[in-house]
């Protein structure tokens, strides 16, 4: 069982990041809101139901391959 990180802790962890972020196992995209404007995000999610939620939350992708 994995505990979810609360929003303030997630923001403190993700907000300082810059550059390109590759999130492997992006889940439902809960981290997306925590990244600052200087992040170019790429996410991979193999689970179909999580991927559907991720695509609904993620910015419009440039390409989709699966």
Image: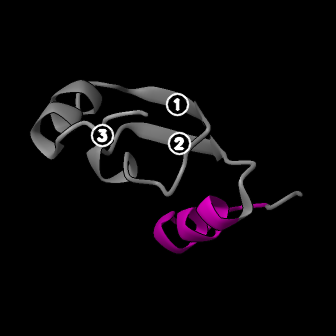
The picture places residue 1, in percent across and down from the top left corner, at 43, 34
Q: Considering the numbered disc 3 on the image, is that residue within a helix, a strand or a loop?
A: loop
The picture places residue 66, in percent across and down from the top left corner, at 89, 57
**Mark 1 lies on residue:** 21
Residue 63 is drawn in which quadrant? bottom right
Check the image and report above or below for 51 versus 52.
Answer: above
Q: Earlier in the sequence, mark 3 or mark 1?
A: 3
Hey, which residue is sitting farthest left in the picture? 8
Q: Which residues are magenta?
A: 49-63
The picture places residue 35, in percent across and down from the top left corner, at 33, 41
Spatial CA span between label 2 and label 3: 21 Å
Position of residue 57 in the picture relative to residue 44 (left or right): left
Is mark 2 in CB contact (under 8 Å) with mark 3? no
**Mark 3 lies on residue:** 4
Disc 3 packing (10 Å; few <14; some 14–19; many ≥20): few
Residue appearing at x 60%, y 60% in the figure: 50
Is mark 2 in CB contact (under 8 Å) with mark 1? yes
The picture places residue 39, in percent across and down from the top left corner, at 42, 37
């Amino acid at each position: 069982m994995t505990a979810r990180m609360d929003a303030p802790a997630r923001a403190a962890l993700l907000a300082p990041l810059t550059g390109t972020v590759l999130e492997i196992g992006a889940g439902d995209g809960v981290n997306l809101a925590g990244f600052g404007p200087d992040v170019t995000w790429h996410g991979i999610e193999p689970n179909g139901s999580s991927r559907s939620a991720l695509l609904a939350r993620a910015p419009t992708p440039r390409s989709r391959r699966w």
